[in-house]
Amino acid sequence: MKTRDIFDRRFLARQRIGRGFRAICLAATTVGIVVLAMLLADVLWDGVGWLDWQFLSSYPSRFPEQAGIKPALLGTLWLMGLTALFSLPLGVGAAIYQRTSPHFRAFL
């Protein structure tokens, strides 16, 4: 038996194993996405009846009919704004630094 034949058989076996692993990963990912979509659909189905302007624009209350989430929404928007305020200049600065670094200029 030639060395080339042994190499080819091992290579083909590795390819089969790789295809099998890829199929298992794809199946697991698909199952996870389907379950997540089903959970999100259930939450939306149950919660869409409670979502109205009064709920979004009211403050928390001990009375369920008057309770709202206005401070939580405003806090989330405030936090997202602050995060963008700090992360965007930092990201642009990092991109400019990487673009003009000596390591990058060596490849031009």
Image (spheres, grey):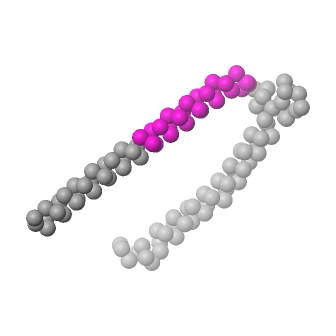
Query: What residue do we see at 32% from left, 52% from top?
Result: 18
| Residue shown at 38% from the left, 77% from the top | 106
Q: Is residue 58 in view from this perspective?
A: no
Q: Which quadrant of the figure has residue 107?
A: bottom left
Image quarter where the C terminus lies is bottom left
87 over 30 or under it: above or below: below
- The stretch in magenta equals 27-52
Q: Position of residue 66 (x, y in %)?
A: 85, 27
Secondary structure mostly taken by the magenta-highlighted segment of the chain: helix
Q: State yes or no: residue 66 in magenta.
A: no
Q: Is residue 89 left or right of residue 68?
A: left
Q: Is residue 70 above or below residue 77?
A: above
Q: Nearer the viewer, residue 59 or 101?
A: 59
Looking at the image, which residue sits at the far top?
Answer: 49
Q: Residue 49, image x and y in percent?
A: 70, 21
- Residue nearest the observer in this picture, 16 or 78: 16
Mark yes or no: residue 49 visible. Answer: yes
* Quadrant assignment, res 39: top right
Q: Is 61 positioned to the left or the right of 28 in the image?
A: right
Q: Is residue 89 above or below residue 80?
A: below
Position in image of residue 58 (x %, y %): 82, 31
Magenta span has 32?
Answer: yes
Image coordinates for residue 3, horizontal then vertical, percent: 14, 67
Comparing 66 with 2, the one in front is: 2
- Count of numbered tags: 0
Dividing the picture into quadrants, the one containing residue 53 is top right
Q: Nearer the viewer, residue 89 or 48?
A: 48
